[in-house]
C-alpha cells in the first residue's frame, strides 16, 4: 500500500515556504510508505475580488467580476471567502484534482457525488466529456440547477448515493453543506426529509454508464458506505473528502485500505484521499 500524508492545517506538517507548502509528515502514518513522485500541493489563493450579492427568495447569488454562484440563504461566511479566492479554483485545483496523479482529462466521464451548488462540476465541465451531478438536498439542488445553466455536458440528479437503493431520512442542516444522512457534525438538523438513495451500480444503470473515469465523493460522513459499493473494475480514479464528519472520526484509513486492496495507488493531502489505477 502506498500512502502519503501532508497537511495544510497548522497542528500537523512543517511549513516550508510561501505560498503555504507543507512537507510530508511521515509520523502520521508510521507504518505506511509514501507514493513516489507525489509532492505537497501549493496553495496560491490571493483574496483580491469584491463580492456582491443578490437575494432571491431562499437563495442568494454571490458574484464577482469573474464568477457567480447561487447558494442557499443564509450564506455561510466561508462561501464568501471561497468566491473571493476563486470558487472553481478552490474546488478543482485546491481540493479535488491532484496534479500528476488524479487529473481530469478531456475524454473523462465524471460523477460528482455531493455536488452542493456545483462548484466542482462547473470547474471540470469545460475539461471533460460529461459530468453527472448527484445532490440530495432540495435547497442545494435548486442552486445547483441555476449554477449549471449554460453547460450542455452536465446532468443533475436530486438523489443521494448510499450502500443500498431505497428511501431514507435525510437531515437538512443549519449550514447547507452539512446536510447529511447522519446528524450534522456542526449545529443541528432544522428539518428531516425523505430522499431517494441509490448504490453506485444502480446509478450507473439508471444513466446507462458502463464506466466512470473520475468519481468524486463528498457525502458528509457516509463516504465509506458509498466506496464499498464501487464496481472497482469500472472506475479508474476516486477522490474522497474524508473529513471527520462521523462523530468526529475520519474514514481516511478505512477507505485507503479498501481502495489499496482493490489495486489503486492511494495518496492523501489533508483529509482528501486520491486513488487511481496504474492503467
Image (tube, rainbow, N blue to C red):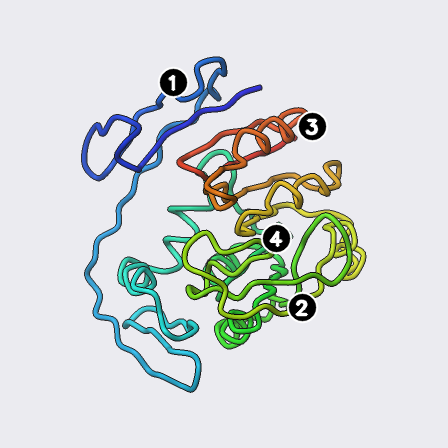
Q: Which residue is mark 1?
A: 26
Taking the spot 59% from the left edge, 45% from the top edge, the residue there is: 223
CA gap between label 3 and label 4 equals: 20 Å
Circles 4 and 1: CB distance less than 8 Å?
no
> Residue 187: where, in percent of width, then height?
41, 59
Answer above or below: position of 278 versus 232: above
CA gap between label 2 and label 3 equals: 33 Å
The residue lying toward the viewer, choosing from 253 and 245, is 245
Circles 3 and 4: CB distance less than 8 Å?
no
Looking at the rendered image, the disc whose residue lies closer to the viewer, 4 or 2, is 2
Please identify the quadrant where the N terminus is shown: top right
CA gap between label 4 and label 1 equals: 32 Å
> Residue 110: where, in percent of width, then height?
61, 53
The residue lying toward the viewer, choosing from 222 and 277, is 222
Secondary structure at badge 2 equals strand
Circles 2 and 1: CB distance less than 8 Å?
no
> Residue 143: where, in percent of width, then height?
49, 74
Answer above or below: position of 63 versus 163: below
> Residue 3: where, in percent of width, then height?
50, 24
Q: Which residue is mark 3?
A: 262
Q: Which residue is mark 4?
A: 110
Q: Please tell me how crowded label 3 is: few (under 14), some (14-19), or many (20+) other residues with Cα within 10 Å.
A: few
CA gap between label 4 and label 2 equals: 26 Å
Looking at the rendered image, the disc whose residue lies closer to the viewer, 3 or 4, is 3
Q: Earlier in the sequence, mark 4 or mark 1?
A: 1
Amino acid at each position: 500500500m502506498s500512502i502519503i500524508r501532508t497537511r495544510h492545517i497548522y497542528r500537523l506538517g512543517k511549513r516550508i515556504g510561501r505560498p503555504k507548502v507543507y512537507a510530508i509528515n511521515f509520523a502520521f502514518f508510521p507504518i505506511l510508505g509514501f507514493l513516489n513522485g507525489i509532492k505537497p500541493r501549493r496553495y496560491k489563493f490571493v483574496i483580491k475580488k469584491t463580492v456582491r450579492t443578490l437575494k432571491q427568495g431562499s437563495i442568494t447569488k454571490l458574484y464577482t467580476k469573474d464568477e457567480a454562484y447561487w447558494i442557499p440563504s443564509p450564506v455561510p461566511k466561508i462561501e464568501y471567502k471561497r468566491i473571493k479566492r476563486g470558487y472553481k479554483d478552490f474546488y478543482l485545483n485546491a481540493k479535488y484534482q491532484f496534479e500528476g496523479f488524479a487529473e481530469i482529462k478531456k475524454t473523462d466521464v465524471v460523477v460528482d457525488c455531493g455536488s452542493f451548488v456545483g462548484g466542482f462540476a462547473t470547474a471540470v465541465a469545460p475539461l471533460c466529456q460529461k459530468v453527472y451531478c448527484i445532490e440530495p438536498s432540495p435547497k442545494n439542488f435548486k442552486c445547483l440547477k441555476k449554477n449549471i445553466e449554460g453547460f450542455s455536458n452536465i446532468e443533475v440528479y436530486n438523489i443521494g448515493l448510499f450502500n443500498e437503493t431505497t428511501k431514507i431520512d435525510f437531515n437538512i442542516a443549519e449550514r447547507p453543506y452539512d446536510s447529511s444522512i447522519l446528524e450534522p457534525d456542526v449545529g443541528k438538523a432544522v428539518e428531516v426529509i425523505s430522499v431517494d438513495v441509490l448504490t453506485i451500480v444502480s446509478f450507473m444503470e439508471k444513466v446507462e454508464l458502463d464506466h466512470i473515469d473520475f468519481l468524486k465523493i463528498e457525502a458528509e460522513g457516509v463516504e465509506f458506505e458509498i466506496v464499498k459499493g464501487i464496481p472497482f473494475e469500472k472506475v479508474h480514479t476516486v477522490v474522497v473528502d474524508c473529513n471527520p464528519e462521523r462523530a468526529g472520526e475520519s474514514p481516511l484509513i478505512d477507505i485507503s485500505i479498501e481502495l489499496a486492496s482493490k489495486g489503486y495507488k492511494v495518496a492523501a493531502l489533508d483529509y482528501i484521499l486520491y486513488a487511481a489505477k496504474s492503467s
